[in-house]
Image (tube, grey):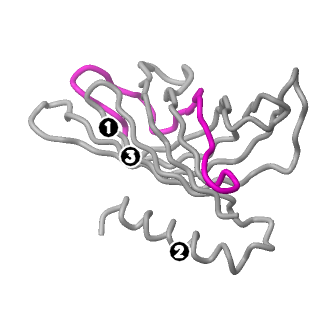
Amino acid sequence: MNLLGAALAALAAAACSHSVSAQSSFAPTAAFVQAGTAQDTHQVAIGLTWDWTRRWNLWSGEISGYWEGSISQWSYPGADDRRTAWLAQVGAIPVFRYRPDGGASPWFFEGGVGVTFTTNVYETDRKRFSTSFNFGDHLALGRNFGARRKHELSLRFEHYSNAGIKHPNPGENFVQIRYLRRFE
Protein backbone atom coordinates (compact mmCIF):
# COMPACT_ATOMS: atom_id res chain seq x y z
CA MET A 1 0.00 0.00 0.00
CA ASN A 2 1.43 3.39 -0.94
CA LEU A 3 1.54 6.43 1.35
CA LEU A 4 -1.65 7.97 -0.04
CA GLY A 5 -3.53 4.64 0.30
CA ALA A 6 -2.46 4.35 3.93
CA ALA A 7 -3.53 7.94 4.57
CA LEU A 8 -6.95 7.31 2.97
CA ALA A 9 -7.43 4.27 5.22
CA ALA A 10 -6.54 6.35 8.29
CA LEU A 11 -8.93 9.11 7.19
CA ALA A 12 -11.75 6.59 6.73
CA ALA A 13 -11.06 5.14 10.20
CA ALA A 14 -11.16 8.65 11.71
CA ALA A 15 -14.46 9.39 9.97
CA CYS A 16 -16.00 6.11 11.19
CA SER A 17 -14.82 6.61 14.75
CA HIS A 18 -16.05 10.22 14.88
CA SER A 19 -19.61 9.22 15.78
CA VAL A 20 -18.28 7.22 18.73
CA SER A 21 -16.01 10.00 20.00
CA ALA A 22 -18.14 13.05 19.22
CA GLN A 23 -17.80 14.25 22.82
CA SER A 24 -14.02 14.53 22.51
CA SER A 25 -12.74 18.06 22.00
CA PHE A 26 -10.02 16.60 19.78
CA ALA A 27 -12.47 14.98 17.37
CA PRO A 28 -12.22 16.39 13.83
CA THR A 29 -15.23 18.22 12.45
CA ALA A 30 -14.72 17.45 8.73
CA ALA A 31 -12.65 15.55 6.16
CA PHE A 32 -11.54 16.74 2.75
CA VAL A 33 -9.96 15.67 -0.48
CA GLN A 34 -8.39 18.09 -2.93
CA ALA A 35 -6.49 18.02 -6.19
CA GLY A 36 -4.46 20.70 -7.88
CA THR A 37 -1.84 21.52 -10.44
CA ALA A 38 1.13 23.84 -10.86
CA GLN A 39 2.53 23.70 -14.41
CA ASP A 40 3.82 20.09 -14.66
CA THR A 41 3.34 19.27 -10.98
CA HIS A 42 0.18 17.59 -9.71
CA GLN A 43 -0.98 17.33 -6.12
CA VAL A 44 -3.58 15.14 -4.43
CA ALA A 45 -4.32 15.72 -0.75
CA ILE A 46 -6.55 14.45 2.01
CA GLY A 47 -7.04 15.88 5.45
CA LEU A 48 -9.09 16.66 8.50
CA THR A 49 -10.29 19.94 10.00
CA TRP A 50 -11.07 21.03 13.55
CA ASP A 51 -13.46 24.01 13.83
CA TRP A 52 -12.75 26.80 16.30
CA THR A 53 -15.52 27.73 18.71
CA ARG A 54 -14.68 31.44 18.61
CA ARG A 55 -16.40 33.74 16.05
CA TRP A 56 -16.07 37.45 15.34
CA ASN A 57 -18.41 39.92 13.63
CA LEU A 58 -16.83 42.01 10.89
CA TRP A 59 -18.65 44.45 8.61
CA SER A 60 -21.87 42.64 7.78
CA GLY A 61 -20.36 39.18 8.04
CA GLU A 62 -18.75 36.72 10.40
CA ILE A 63 -15.19 35.44 10.78
CA SER A 64 -14.61 31.91 12.03
CA GLY A 65 -11.74 29.51 11.64
CA TYR A 66 -10.39 26.00 11.83
CA TRP A 67 -7.21 23.96 12.06
CA GLU A 68 -6.32 21.90 9.02
CA GLY A 69 -4.11 18.83 9.00
CA SER A 70 -3.26 17.26 5.65
CA ILE A 71 -1.13 14.76 3.84
CA SER A 72 -0.51 15.07 0.12
CA GLN A 73 1.43 13.55 -2.71
CA TRP A 74 3.08 15.55 -5.48
CA SER A 75 4.06 14.01 -8.83
CA TYR A 76 6.25 15.86 -11.30
CA PRO A 77 8.90 15.37 -13.99
CA GLY A 78 12.22 14.60 -12.31
CA ALA A 79 15.19 16.89 -12.70
CA ASP A 80 16.74 14.48 -15.21
CA ASP A 81 13.52 14.50 -17.35
CA ARG A 82 13.67 10.71 -17.69
CA ARG A 83 11.42 9.76 -14.79
CA THR A 84 8.45 10.91 -12.80
CA ALA A 85 9.37 11.96 -9.30
CA TRP A 86 7.10 12.25 -6.31
CA LEU A 87 7.15 13.43 -2.75
CA ALA A 88 4.81 13.28 0.22
CA GLN A 89 3.92 16.38 2.20
CA VAL A 90 2.42 16.83 5.67
CA GLY A 91 0.93 20.18 6.69
CA ALA A 92 -0.72 21.98 9.60
CA ILE A 93 -2.45 25.28 8.84
CA PRO A 94 -4.70 27.60 10.86
CA VAL A 95 -7.38 29.06 8.57
CA PHE A 96 -9.61 32.14 8.92
CA ARG A 97 -12.95 32.12 7.09
CA TYR A 98 -15.19 35.09 6.29
CA ARG A 99 -18.86 34.44 5.57
CA PRO A 100 -21.06 37.41 4.44
CA ASP A 101 -24.66 38.11 5.48
CA GLY A 102 -23.98 37.84 9.21
CA GLY A 103 -22.53 34.37 8.71
CA ALA A 104 -25.71 33.05 7.06
CA SER A 105 -24.44 33.05 3.46
CA PRO A 106 -23.53 29.70 1.89
CA TRP A 107 -20.54 31.50 0.26
CA PHE A 108 -17.24 32.06 2.03
CA PHE A 109 -13.75 33.45 1.54
CA GLU A 110 -10.81 32.08 3.48
CA GLY A 111 -7.08 32.34 3.96
CA GLY A 112 -4.47 30.52 5.97
CA VAL A 113 -0.73 30.24 6.57
CA GLY A 114 0.97 27.25 8.18
CA VAL A 115 3.89 24.85 8.02
CA THR A 116 4.58 21.87 5.77
CA PHE A 117 7.24 19.19 5.57
CA THR A 118 8.11 17.07 2.53
CA THR A 119 9.79 13.67 2.36
CA ASN A 120 12.44 15.06 0.03
CA VAL A 121 13.42 18.37 -1.56
CA TYR A 122 11.25 19.33 -4.55
CA GLU A 123 13.38 19.50 -7.71
CA THR A 124 12.31 19.63 -11.35
CA ASP A 125 14.17 20.65 -14.51
CA ARG A 126 12.90 24.24 -14.00
CA LYS A 127 13.12 24.82 -10.24
CA ARG A 128 14.59 23.48 -7.04
CA PHE A 129 13.54 24.09 -3.45
CA SER A 130 16.37 24.27 -0.93
CA THR A 131 14.47 22.88 2.07
CA SER A 132 11.93 20.19 2.93
CA PHE A 133 10.41 22.62 5.46
CA ASN A 134 8.15 25.16 3.79
CA PHE A 135 5.25 27.45 4.55
CA GLY A 136 1.92 26.90 2.87
CA ASP A 137 -0.45 29.80 2.41
CA HIS A 138 -3.73 29.91 0.54
CA LEU A 139 -6.70 32.02 -0.46
CA ALA A 140 -9.99 30.37 -1.38
CA LEU A 141 -13.55 31.02 -2.49
CA GLY A 142 -16.13 28.37 -1.65
CA ARG A 143 -19.74 27.43 -1.10
CA ASN A 144 -21.55 25.08 1.25
CA PHE A 145 -24.51 23.01 0.05
CA GLY A 146 -26.74 20.12 1.05
CA ALA A 147 -28.67 19.38 4.20
CA ARG A 148 -27.27 21.43 7.11
CA ARG A 149 -24.44 22.57 4.80
CA LYS A 150 -22.55 19.32 5.31
CA HIS A 151 -20.82 19.59 1.93
CA GLU A 152 -18.61 22.28 0.47
CA LEU A 153 -16.63 22.97 -2.67
CA SER A 154 -13.89 25.54 -2.91
CA LEU A 155 -11.42 26.88 -5.44
CA ARG A 156 -8.05 27.52 -3.82
CA PHE A 157 -4.84 29.25 -4.76
CA GLU A 158 -2.00 27.83 -2.65
CA HIS A 159 1.65 28.87 -2.50
CA TYR A 160 4.51 26.89 -0.95
CA SER A 161 7.95 28.34 -0.18
CA ASN A 162 10.42 28.59 2.69
CA ALA A 163 9.98 32.39 3.08
CA GLY A 164 13.65 33.04 2.32
CA ILE A 165 15.05 30.85 5.11
CA LYS A 166 17.47 29.34 2.58
CA HIS A 167 18.11 29.95 -1.12
CA PRO A 168 17.09 29.12 -3.77
CA ASN A 169 13.50 29.81 -2.81
CA PRO A 170 11.45 29.75 -6.05
CA GLY A 171 8.17 28.64 -4.46
CA GLU A 172 5.40 26.78 -6.22
CA ASN A 173 1.82 27.94 -6.89
CA PHE A 174 -1.08 25.51 -7.14
CA VAL A 175 -4.66 25.98 -8.28
CA GLN A 176 -6.77 23.45 -6.36
CA ILE A 177 -10.32 22.16 -6.10
CA ARG A 178 -11.42 20.92 -2.67
CA TYR A 179 -14.41 18.88 -1.57
CA LEU A 180 -15.09 18.81 2.18
CA ARG A 181 -17.69 16.87 4.12
CA ARG A 182 -18.70 17.75 7.68
CA PHE A 183 -19.19 14.93 10.18
CA GLU A 184 -22.01 16.59 12.14
Q: Are marks 3 and 1 in contact (CB under 8 Å)?
A: yes
Rate crowding at label 2 as few (under 14), some (14 to 19) or many (20 or more) other CA atoms within 10 Å. Answer: few
Q: Position of residue 33 (x, y in %)?
A: 47, 51
- Which dot marks residue 44? 3
Task: Measure the alpha-carbon separation of dots 1 and 2.
Answer: 26 Å
Q: Nearer the viewer, residue 102 or 93?
A: 102
**Earlier along the polypeptide chain: callout 2 or callout 3?**
2
Q: Is residue 140 magenta?
A: yes
What residue occupies the far bottom of the structure in this picture? 20
Give the residue at mark 1. 42
Give the residue at mark 2. 13
- In this rendering, would 30 be left or right of 80? right
Q: Amino acid at mark 2?
A: Ala
Q: Which residues are magenta?
A: 121-150
Rate crowding at label 1 as few (under 14), some (14 to 19) or many (20 or more) other CA atoms within 10 Å. Answer: some
Task: Measure the alpha-carbon separation of dots 2 and 3.
Answer: 19 Å
Q: Nearer the viewer, residue 44 or 131?
A: 44
Whether 170 is drawn above or below 77: the answer is above
Q: Amino acid at mark 1?
A: His
- The quadrant of the picture occupied by the N terminus is bottom left
Task: Measure the alpha-carbon separation of dots 3 and 1.
Answer: 7 Å
- In this rendering, would 86 be left or right of 61? left
Whether 112 is drawn above or below 15: the answer is above
Q: Is residue 11 magenta?
A: no
Q: Residue at x 53, y 41 (%)?
A: 153
Q: Position of residue 12 (x, y in %)?
A: 50, 70
| Tag 2 secondary structure | helix
**Earlier along the polypeptide chain: callout 1 or callout 2?**
2
Q: Nearer the viewer, residue 71 or 134?
A: 71
- Which dot marks residue 22? none
